[in-house]
């Protein structure tokens, strides 16, 4: 064993240790987030909290039933609307790897996947919310 | 098709702002809804600084995870645990990251700021960049792991047979071979960092001025839309949609580029096997 070999072995060991340390360090946020959520959240969760409506600010008690229902309805509706398209596109893309339509569809999937949710939000606002608001503005004048 | 519809919708809705400000929008430094003067430079800078800081913070970790899972430890209980933890990290909703950042990272950053003697806002560019880095590590790491495992075994074995140590194999064979794939993973996570809305909005501090240091509060393109769009009307709304248009074009470009590079890497790898 000459010096050159020893140096290479030491470098190898050092690199291995650095990689292991950095990789382990990356799980730290997950553990911290889990710890934070459980420590602060577990105490307030009980049956009442889950099935009651929020009370006015300043009043003790109340729950998040409306939020749970909202999330649930949203998930069901969006799943019904999106799953057929998603599965159809997936089958089509896995069956047909070449071709013009397949390439366009694949590009669309990439673009849609990468589009920030806020941009989708603006688009949905322009399409869905804005027209209704202009209609309901008339009825809001005389409440 | 979705691309064109989104593009057209945003374009049509932002016409008043494009007419009023044109390209000066990109270097205008004032964003004043009362005076109806809009320039997006503070937000462009905010997005640029936060996402690039996040990328630089995440690179060492994501490459370490890629090598750890793709080369050092492919099997076993702890690597399986690490892999599933990273998947869980990728699945946490961004609002939870924001909440955690607000309660955990913000006090830490505030302490650092007090030590350094700058105004202790707590929220700001540094906090957002940290939370973004944590959020994008899973993405670049999972893509990096895939390309590291794609490196042909005969190349590595040839290097080992010449007496190379594991470090030398990683440095001279794996990293050069997987480089473009790793870069693609970083590009895709950059796209995510640019578009990230909720966590950043909670932690950036919402100041419509050009950031002066990495501790100062700022606003990103996504966060300014999230903050102001609900109350905006007329030219303000059009300007915000203009910002959204720019955001959409940038993220689309970055994503298409990243996907293209990954596809090329996978194609080359499949050629070498056959």
Image (cartoon, coloured by chain):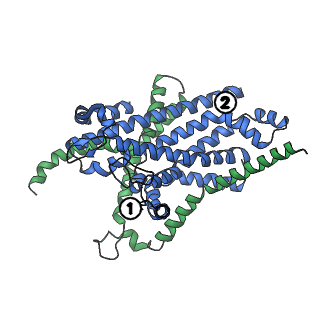
Chain colours: A green, B blue
Q: Residue at x 63, y 35 (%)?
A: B179
| B217 lies above or below B155 | below
* Residue B269 spot, x, y in % from top left: 66, 30
* Residue B38 spot, x, y in % from top left: 26, 41
- Quarter location, residue B20: top left
Disc 2: host chain: B
The residue labelled by disc 1 is A68
| A40 lies above or below A104 | below
On the question of residue B37 being in view, the answer is yes
Label number found at residue B269: 2
Q: Residue at x 42, y 73 (%)?
A: A47
- Quarter location, residue A67: bottom left
Q: Is residue B161 left or right of residue A104?
A: right
Foreground of the two, A10 or A113:
A10
Do pointers 1 and 2 mark residues of a single chain? no
- Quarter location, residue B3: top left
Q: Which circle, 1 or 2, is nearer the viewer? A: 2
| B157 lies above or below A51 | above
Q: Residue furthest front?
A: B117
* Mark 1 neighbour class, 10 Å CA radius: few under 14, some 14 to 19, many 20 or more: few
């Amino acid at each position: 064993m000459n010096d050159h070999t020893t140096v290479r072995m030491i470098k190898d060991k050092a690199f291995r240790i650095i990689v292991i340390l950095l990789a382990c360090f990356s799980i730290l946020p997950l553990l911290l987030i889990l710890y934070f959520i459980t420590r602060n959240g577990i105490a307030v969760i009980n049956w009442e909290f889950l099935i009651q409506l929020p009370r006015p600010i300043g009043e003790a008690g109340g729950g998040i039933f409306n939020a749970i229902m909202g999330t649930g309805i949203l998930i069901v509706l969006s799943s019904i609307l999106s799953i057929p398209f998603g599965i159809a596109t997936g089958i089509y893309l896995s069956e047909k790897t070449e071709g013009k339509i397949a390439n366009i569809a694949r590009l669309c999937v990439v673009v849609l996947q990468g589009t920030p949710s806020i941009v989708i939000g603006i688009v949905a606002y322009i399409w869905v919310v804005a027209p209704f608001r202009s209609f309901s503005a008339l009825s809001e004048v005389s409440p | 098709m979705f691309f064109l519809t989104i593009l057209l919708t945003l374009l049509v809705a932002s016409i008043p702002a494009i007419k009023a400000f044109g390209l000066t929008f990109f270097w205008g430094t004032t964003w004043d809804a009362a005076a109806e003067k809009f320039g997006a430079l503070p937000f462009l800078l905010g997005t640029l600084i936060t996402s690039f800081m996040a990328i630089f913070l995440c690179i060492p970790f994501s490459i370490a995870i890629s090598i750890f899972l793709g080369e050092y430890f492919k099997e076993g209980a702890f690597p399986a645990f690490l892999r599933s933890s990273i998947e869980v990290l990728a699945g946490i909703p961004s609002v939870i990251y924001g909440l955690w950042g607000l309660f955990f990272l913000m006090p830490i950053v505030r302490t650092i700021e007090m030590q350094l003697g700058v105004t202790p806002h707590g929220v700001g560019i540094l906090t957002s960049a940290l939370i973004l880095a944590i959020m994008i590590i899973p993405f670049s790491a999972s893509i990096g792991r895939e390309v590291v495992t794609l490196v042909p075994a005969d190349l590595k074995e040839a290097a080992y047979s010449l007496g190379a140590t594991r470090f030398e194999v990683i440095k001279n064979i794996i990293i050069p071979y997987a480089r473009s794939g790793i870069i693609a993973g970083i590009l895709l996570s950059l796209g995510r960092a640019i578009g990230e809305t909720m966590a950043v909005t909670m932690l950036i501090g919402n100041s419509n001025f050009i950031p002066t240091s990495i501790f100062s509060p700022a606003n990103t393109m996504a966060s300014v839309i999230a903050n102001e769009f609900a109350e905006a009307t007329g030219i303000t709304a059009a300007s915000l949609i203009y910002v959204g248009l720019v955001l959409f074009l940038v993220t689309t470009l970055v994503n298409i580029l990243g996907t293209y590079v990954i596809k090329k890497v996978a194609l080359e790898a499949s050629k070498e096997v056959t």
